[in-house]
Amino acid sequence: MLDLSNYSLPAIFLAGFAVILAAIEFGHWLGARVGDRGDDNVPTLEGAMIGLLALMFGFTFALALTRFDARRTAVLAEANAISTTALRARLLPEPHRNEVLGLLQNYVKIRLDVTQHQLTQAEWAAAIDKSNAIQEKLWQQAMAMAASDTGMVPTGLFILALNETIDDQARRLIAQRSRVPNIVQLTLFGIAVVASGFAGYATGVKVRRSRIPVYVMGLLVTCVIIVILDLDRPGAGFIEASQQPMIDAAASLAAISE
């Protein structure tokens, strides 16, 4: 099955618009051959297809927007957890304090680096491995302090915050990997092509009806589909969830470490 995630958004836009234009032209040609004989049900069929397309737009846009909001919320939650871990790390004795703050700075740097450019699957896996390695080092620090600190108040607070940070990475990865199913995207394109074909058919049946509005509709339909696909492509499209919470966390860590 064709997987749209393997293709760039500009390529999908050009190919999708070309297919929609071809459907309009084919519909117009077919409508011109049928002529007034096929005029009875054309408005009903055209309206039904456009209504179905609008329904699919709403359904798919809601799916993509929900996933986009989940990614944005995950960034905020993870940034807050890291900031809380850094604040509680200030309660720790030396040398654990400096070591933990240094590890957290590297941890945030990895988080920001992966959002600044598109990564391949191998690069993304390598970044996750680096994060997991830093988490392991942080947990080793927590275990060492837990073994030597019988009071457990500063260490216990730090362990709770660190555990939340680790959990939030898992939540963010799930949000990052949650995508609109490919079959839904293909169905949206398929309905758009069929609706465009019916619109072109109507221009062929009605000799005096211009095709220009149908071309404009095809362009707008393609643009809306691209916006939906863009919302569903973290790190690869033009619409990105704000990384400002993570940037603020990095700045806070830098200030604490000075």
Image (spheres, rainbow, N blue to C red):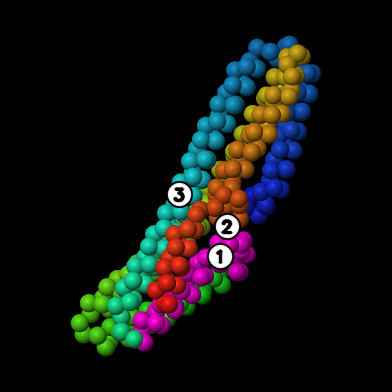
| Residues marked 1 and 2 touching at CB (< 8 Å) | yes
Range covered by the magenta-colored residues: 95-123
Say which residue appears at 31% left-offset and 73% top-offset: 88
- Report x, y in % for residue 59: 50, 37
- Report x, y in % for residue 41: 63, 15
Mark 2 Cα-neighbour bin, 10 Å: few <14, some 14–19, many ≥20? some
User: Which secondary structure, mark 1?
Assistant: helix
Mark found first going from the N terminus, 1 or 2: 1
Mark 3 Cα-neighbour bin, 10 Å: few <14, some 14–19, many ≥20? some
Q: Is residue 132 above or below residue 33?
A: below
- Nearer to me, 239 or 122: 239
Report the residue marked by disc 3.
Answer: 69
Report the residue marked by disc 2.
Answer: 235
Q: Quadrant of residue 252?
A: bottom left
User: Which secondary structure, mark 2?
Assistant: loop
Mark 2 to mark 3 CA distance (whole Å): 14 Å
Three-letter code, disc 1 = Val
Mark found first going from the N terminus, 2 or 3: 3
Three-letter code, disc 3 = Asp
Disc assigned to residue 114: 1
Q: Is residue 66 above or below residue 149?
A: above
